[in-house]
Amino acid sequence: MIVCAVPVKDLVNAKQRLIKALAPDERMALARAMLRDVLRAAAAARLDALWVITRDDEVSAIVRALGAKVLGEPENRGHTAAVALAQQHAARAGAQVFLTIPGDVPLVTAEEIQALAAAAARPASAVFTPSRSRLGTNGVALAPPTVMPLEFGEPSFDNHLAVARQRGLKPEVLALPGLGVDIDCPEDLPVLLAEGAATESRRLLARWDVGARLAATAIQR
């Protein structure tokens, strides 16, 4: 059994670092679109289970509409705690492989998710996909699910490699171009505009003419 878990905090507070580029309603709309892009890719990867860890009712509705399962949490304790909850749940469910990716990587593809899962086919595996900056960790595949703890937040990528080695594992690095792009700050938006033609998220930015807005802001500087 292969499980993929996606932690998502409440939409009201989503994408605060985009505040200089997008209005509050735009940030929420983009967060929704990115989540749908991620869940569509994960569903197309045809793993055994797709879970979203959240306490947000609107997120839960989106998840169920796309055929995924909601793992509720009583409070928003952050990315690390949500993933830990999913790891324990996966272990109890008898999963052999546990994947986790964030909800703000709209360029991820089904093929990339399948590649991440396949890389953890052997026991005692720890596979990590770095963010483009190689500071964050955008993808993890573990076999078994609780073979090591995970802690997110830069510089989580190097930290995860170090923890894996401390536990006697041989961590594998799997660079995946789509999964490596998390949309977190204004500087990430041109990447989504340039590379995300097939995504709902990119279509949303294009409709808002975000490219022209970013260019105007740059000129003003």
Image (cartoon, grey):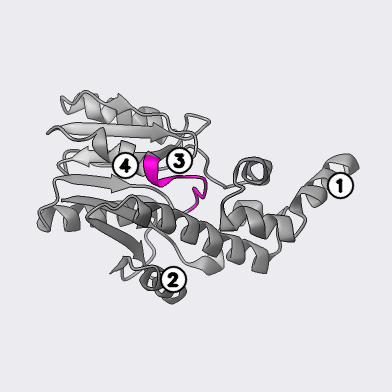
Residue 114 - label? 4
Residue occupying image coordinates x 48% and y 61%: 36
Residue 18, given in percent of the width and then of the height, sits at 65, 53
Mostly what secondary structure, the magenta segment? loop
Mark 2 residue type: Ile
Residue 216 - label? 1
| Among the two numbered marks 2 and 3 on one chain, the one whose residue lies closer to the N terminus | 2
Residue occupying image coordinates x 38% and y 27%: 158
Mark 4 residue type: Gln
Considering only vertical position in the picture, is 136 above or below 23?
Answer: above
Disc 2/disc 3 C-alpha distance (Å): 21 Å
Nearer to us in this view, 135 or 59: 59
- Specify start and end residues of the magenta stretch as a single range: 104-111
Residue receiving disc 2:
62
The crowd level at tag 4 (other Cα within 10 Å; few <14, some 14-19, many 20+) is some
Disc 4/disc 3 C-alpha distance (Å): 12 Å
| Among the two numbered marks 4 and 2 on one chain, the one whose residue lies closer to the N terminus | 2
Residue 25 in which image quadrant: bottom right
Mark 3 residue type: Leu
Q: Please tell me whether mark 4 sits on a helix, a strand or a loop.
A: helix
| Among the two numbered marks 4 and 3 on one chain, the one whose residue lies closer to the N terminus | 4
Depth check, mark 4 against mark 1: the one in front is 4
| Among the two numbered marks 3 and 1 on one chain, the one whose residue lies closer to the N terminus | 3
Mark 1 residue type: Ala
Residue receiving disc 3:
179
Regarding residue 7, the answer to whether it shows in the image is yes
User: Across the whole image, how many numbered discs are drawn on residues?
Assistant: 4
Disc 3/disc 1 C-alpha distance (Å): 29 Å
Q: Please tell me whether mark 2 sits on a helix, a strand or a loop.
A: helix
Disc 4/disc 2 C-alpha distance (Å): 23 Å
In this picture, residue 93 sits left or right of residue 213: left
In this picture, residue 17 sits left or right of residue 159: right
